């Protein structure tokens, strides 16, 4: 054997021996899953008005904990977290973001709701550690408001998460650039530093499909406000899906592996009752309710009170159900036997009586003159809690003062029912059926 052959044999033995040693063995990519939420719209927890409700931070965290027993996992959110920009919405958003941080959320895209809160607020929250991202949201001076993307180093991979917002959601404070070009610009800044791209896109369905067709550079697009979740589907080489509907559904992504070596796969998961409540998220909800009790928001401090028409007379005000009983004794007796008369009690049992989102349907005249205003202001005899006569018939102070004056209606009393008995809170509501339980107004 020549000297060169001996050297080659020795080198081969060293290489093979090194590969057999754990420290030198080529590292196989580990199983990796991502959980994407979005369009939560204030649904920090199921309200409890009916059974079989889905969603909530506590179930999302439980699902993440379950997945982490099987593989490496990261989480992100597409945006659209609250209803509006009121003091109530800002407080709720703070606790939702705290909950997301506790469950290890890596990135939170700026959706329409977040954009309404303005550049200064978004920058302040980002400085405090909230992982906001957006590649196409700018202030009026043309400067980025938050980072365009984040790169997650996990399970032997480098995953770039980029956020975009639809141009239609620009505000007086913020400009929104075309999403497709913003994505390409963001990717150029991190060239060769990522293995896969996931785009968090708060866009309607038609714009999502256009984006998927024009951005083959992106592996997965997870959309936002599509009404219902989009089943995972391929648009060219890009996988398109969405997480929406009050955060009741999340998207699980699985990185390429033995079953799909070249492509990410996805499934839409409903966070229903099969998932238990994560204790840390239950504690976060308790802290949120304690903060609500301290703040005791009035309807004007929320986004739930409907604006009133101008020019209403001063007599347009809620009088209270006790006033109705003076003339409508039989009808009021029927009311006292109904669940409407004790509607507030169901909130107190769960502690949700402190939440304006629940108060608006379980109190009388929420946001109307003379109606329910706050826990502090509604002192005994507590005549504005529960679903009273004027919840359906409208403010009746003028009628109480002069029975010849009819109660002013914006709409038929029947139509008031579905303002609270909607598909979410009362999915089996049927007026004819329910009316039998509270029927009144018949002349003797």
Image (tube, grey):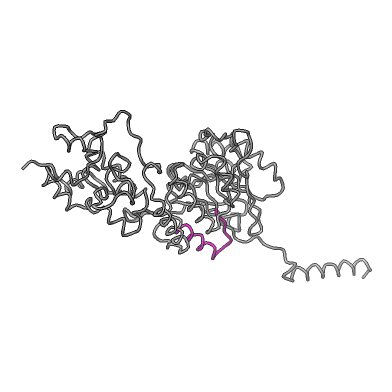
Instruction: State how many labels appear.
Output: 0
420 to 66, vertically: above or below: above
Farthest residue in the left direction?
Answer: 444
Left-right relation of 250 to 318: right
Residue name at image x 46 percent, y 59 percent: 284
Q: Main secondary structure of the magenta part?
A: helix
| Horizontal and vertical percent position of residue 233 | 51, 45
Farthest residue in the top direction?
Answer: 311
Q: What residue span does the magenta drawing correspond to? A: 58-75
- Along the line of sight, the residue nearer the viewer: 77 or 256: 77
Left-right relation of 1 to 332: right
| Horizontal and vertical percent position of residue 277 | 43, 62
| Horizontal and vertical percent position of residue 297 | 39, 47
Left-right relation of 10 to 400: right
Residue 55 visible in this rendered orientation of the protein: no
Residue name at image x 31 percent, y 57 percent: 348
263 to 19, vertically: above or below: above
Residue name at image x 53 percent, y 34 percent: 170
Left-right relation of 25 to 444: right
| Horizontal and vertical percent position of residue 391 | 25, 43
Quadrant housing the C terminus? top left
Residue 253 visible in this rendered orientation of the protein: yes
């Amino acid at each position: 054997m020549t000297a060169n052959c001996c050297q080659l044999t020795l080198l081969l033995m060293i290489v093979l021996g090194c590969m057999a040693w754990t420290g030198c063995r080529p590292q196989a990519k580990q199983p990796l899953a991502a959980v994407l939420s979005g369009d939560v719209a204030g649904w920090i927890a199921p309200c409890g008005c009916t059974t079989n409700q889905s969603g909530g931070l506590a179930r999302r965290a439980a699902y993440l904990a379950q997945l982490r027993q099987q593989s490496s996992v990261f989480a992100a959110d597409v945006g659209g977290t609250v209803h509006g920009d009121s003091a109530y919405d800002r407080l709720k958003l703070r606790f939702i973001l705290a909950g997301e941080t506790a469950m290890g959320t890596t990135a939170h895209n700026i959706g329409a709701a977040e954009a309404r809160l303005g550049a200064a607020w978004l920058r302040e929250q980002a400085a405090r550690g909230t992982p906001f991202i957006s590649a196409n949201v700018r202030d009026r001076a043309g400067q980025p408001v938050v980072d365009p993307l984040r790169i997650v180093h996990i399970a032997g991979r480098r995953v770039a998460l980029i956020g975009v917002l639809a141009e239609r959601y620009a505000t007086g404070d913020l400009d929104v650039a075309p999403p497709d070009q913003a994505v390409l610009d963001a990717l150029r800044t991190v060239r060769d530093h990522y293995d896969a791209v996931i785009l968090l896109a708060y866009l309607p369905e038609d714009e999502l499909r256009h984006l998927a067709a024009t951005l083959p550079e992106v592996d997965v697009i997870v959309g936002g406000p599509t009404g219902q979740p989009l089943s995972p589907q391929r648009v060219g080489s890009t996988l398109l899906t969405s997480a929406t509907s009050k955060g009741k559904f999340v998207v699980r992504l699985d990185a390429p592996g033995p079953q799909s070596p070249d492509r990410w796969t996805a499934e839409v998961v409903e966070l229903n009752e099969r998932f238990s409540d994560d204790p840390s998220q239950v504690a976060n909800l308790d802290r949120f309710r304690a903060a609500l009790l301290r703040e005791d928001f009035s309807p004007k401090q929320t986004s739930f009170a409907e604006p009133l028409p101008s020019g209403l007379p001063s007599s347009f005000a809620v009088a209270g159900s006790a006033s109705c009983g003076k003339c409508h004794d039989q009808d009021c007796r029927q009311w006292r036997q109904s669940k409407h008369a004790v509607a507030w009690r169901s909130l107190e049992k769960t502690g949700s009586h402190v939440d304006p989102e629940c108060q608006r349907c379980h109190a009388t005249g929420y946001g109307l003159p003379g109606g329910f205003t706050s826990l502090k202001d509604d002192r005994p005899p507590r005549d504005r809690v529960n679903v009273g006569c004027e919840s359906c018939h409208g403010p009746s102070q003028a009628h109480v003062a002069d029975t010849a004056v009819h109660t002013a209606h914006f709409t038929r009393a029947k139509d008031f029912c579905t303002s609270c008995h909607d598909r979410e809170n009362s999915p089996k509501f049927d007026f004819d059926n329910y009316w039998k339980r509270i029927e009144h107004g018949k002349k003797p």
